[in-house]
Image (cartoon, helix red, strand yellow):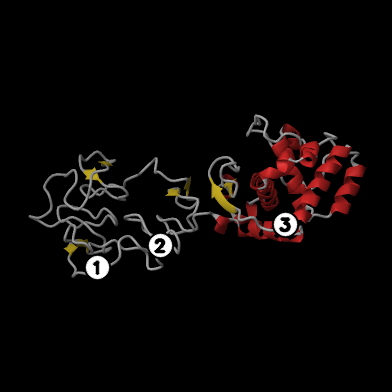
Amino acid sequence: MAARRPETPRPDHRCACGEELKPFWRHCSDCGRPQTWGDDHHETGAECGHCGWMVSDFSWYCPWCGEDIHEDGVSSDRPLKAPAGFRFSAKCDAGCGGGVQYPMDYCPWCGAEQEWPGEDFEGTCPHCERGVDDWMDHCPWCGEDATGQDLIPRAIRRVRRLLAVSRIRPWGYRLLLRPGVSGVDPRYPKIVEIDHSHIVEQRSREEIPWSMVVGLIAHELGHSFLYHHWKWTDTEAFIEAFGEVDKAYRVSDLGWVDFQRRRITTTHPNHVTAYAATHPQEDFAETFRLYVTRRGRMRELLAEMGQKRKGVVVYQKFLELDRFLRDLRT
């Protein structure tokens, strides 16, 4: 049953915290507060008696909570394309012939659940798999942590502790748990995406390979750090140690990498690991990962390189990284 309410004007599309919202977001993307989109501007003259959201008197079902709200003699005897107060975005997924407006959860004519593929967002929420943007702290659909950091707090605490012990100052990076391949876009060096399959596909938190996740994050942070300090790559010392990092990148994402390994490998005398030999950018990221996971203890690293009979260039990599970090601190 559609319920009416008196005038209660409020600012257009703003949460109580002041964050601007898009129409019909269920939660604030900044503070996560649940939202209620009533008929404050008298567009339809009716609200759902169950959830309080704006509805049309012509509808049979609330498009937001799915409850039956039809009224005899008022609700339309046939599905409509777009009643007053709403616009047409697509046809009902169930094929009833009625129209739905984005982002309605249910068809207002038959009550069938609706899906909205191809939403125009930068990423996907790791909790509900709907669209979110990289800057969002909370998912506007489910209200959970849009970054997914709440799923890997143990790994994040460990990485932050390792960076602090290694005396590497934060550079404003932002970790995001996302579907697909882990990586960093050079155009957005502070956005670090971590493949969420390592987390969500596990049946329990005890099965999550935390040491691997820590190593993976440290590796991707190496890419972010390098892109953030890209001018450093033009210096003679950097090129002599790591080579030309801007050469064509042709590295397969299907290759297996042991990010749990914290020791320098005995193979590839001029690189810290086999994966580091695939490209100068991966060489730096792997060097950065080992430097961080070994807490920046240069004496231990240099001694181990001697035991593994590494080439002089591997010494140069760690020494140049350590020197650059010291320069940043001073």
Front-lying residue, 240 or 45 = 240
Q: Is residue 258 visible?
A: no
Look at mark 1 in the image and give the residue it sits on. 9
Above or below residue 81? Residue 329 is below
Which residue sits at x=54%, y=54%? 148
Dot 3 alpha-carbon crowd within 10 angstroms: few under 14, some 14 to 19, many 20 or more: some
Separation of marks 1 and 3 at Cα, in angstroms? 50 Å
Horizontal side of residue 231 vs 113, given as left or right = right
Residue 17 on image: x %, y %: 41, 67
Q: Earlier in the sequence, mark 2 or mark 3?
A: 2
| Element assignment for label 1 | loop
Separation of marks 2 and 3 at Cα, in angstroms? 33 Å
Q: Which mark is residue 19?
A: 2
Q: Amino acid at mark 3?
A: Ile
Look at mark 3 in the image and give the residue it sits on. 168
Which residue sits at x=25%, y=48%? 107
Horizontal side of residue 49 vs 314, given as left or right = left
Q: Amino acid at mark 2?
A: Glu
Front-lying residue, 13 or 149 = 13
Above or below residue 22? Residue 220 is above
Q: Earlier in the sequence, mark 2 or mark 1?
A: 1
Q: Is residue 313 visible?
A: yes
Quadrant, the N terminus: bottom left
| Element assignment for label 3 | loop
Q: Amino acid at mark 1?
A: Pro
Residue 152 on image: x %, y %: 60, 56
- Quarter occupied by residue 15: bottom left
